[in-house]
Amino acid sequence: MQKVLSTLRKAVQKYDLIQNGDKIAVGVSGGKDSLVLLKALSDFKRFGIYDYEIVAVTIDIYSGKEDYSRLKKFCKDLGVELVIEKTDIKEIVFDIRKEKNPCSLCAKMRRGALNSVCNRLGCNKLALAHHKQDVINTFFMSLFYEGRLSTMLPKSYMSNANITLIRPLYLTDESKIINVSKNFPILKSKCPANDNTKRAEISDLTSFLERAIPQSKKRIEHAILSPESYNLLDKI
């Protein structure tokens, strides 16, 4: 956990993610990334560098049919409040609308539900568990599927909800998250589209690139995260 905390602290300070007095809703799906983020923010708070509150928020997309008992115990052991918001997102996306490409609509609905809970709880910030590999994968998704040079940002203000979105694991390697989460109560995803998405395809591609071109991942990270490496046509 120490290595995760080190990169989290670096991201918080580099991108000004947390201030004193913040009330932060942590989006917790039950997957490895969100559980590690919750644990890391809970541990980081104990350092006393910043005075902030955290509350775990889980969007239940399965109409209350999911078993969250292990997640509840995890949060209780951390001393963190857990709010579970029941929704019918899975039914709407897969059963009623029968979306062929469900991920985009599902993500929008889950984000909308998260924003609503944040406002209800008086949270000014929403922390999501995207890590360095997610940043890279999003860059390639934008490039290949949209023809844009773009990726997710470490911090962005959502004016429609009056909430600041932060990504404290922005500089954290997924390998560190995997190592930390080995004994965590990870919930297995029941999503019908799990592992059959464009993001999963891009993840396979970047893994292939790393095998075919050693150190390619490190160079891609540098190109995306280092402004001084940027040299495209608008520089002319």
Image: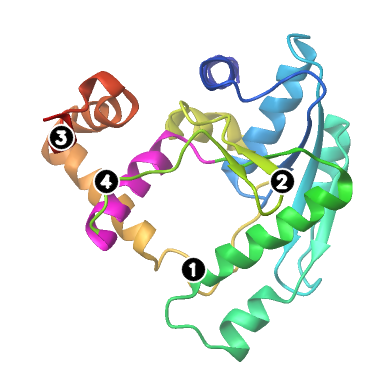
Residue at mark 2: 162
Point out the tag, 1 or 4, that comes first from the N-terminus.
1
Quadrant of the rendered structure where residue 32 is? Answer: top right
Mark 3 touches mark 4? (CB < 8 Å)? yes
- SS of the residue under disc 3: loop
96 displayed left or right of 74: left
Residue at mark 1: 103
Q: Marks 1 and 4, Cα distance to the nearest angstrom?
A: 21 Å
Vertical side of 51 occupied by 203: above or below: below
Circle 1 crowding by C-alpha within 10 Å: few under 14, some 14–19, many from 20: some
Which label lies toward us, 2 or 4? 2
Point out the tag, 1 or 2, that comes first from the N-terminus.
1
Which label lies toward us, 1 or 4? 4
- SS of the residue under disc 4: loop
Q: Which residues are magenta?
A: 130-146
Residue at mark 3: 232
* Most common secondary structure along the magenta stretch: helix
Mark 1 touches mark 4? (CB < 8 Å)? no
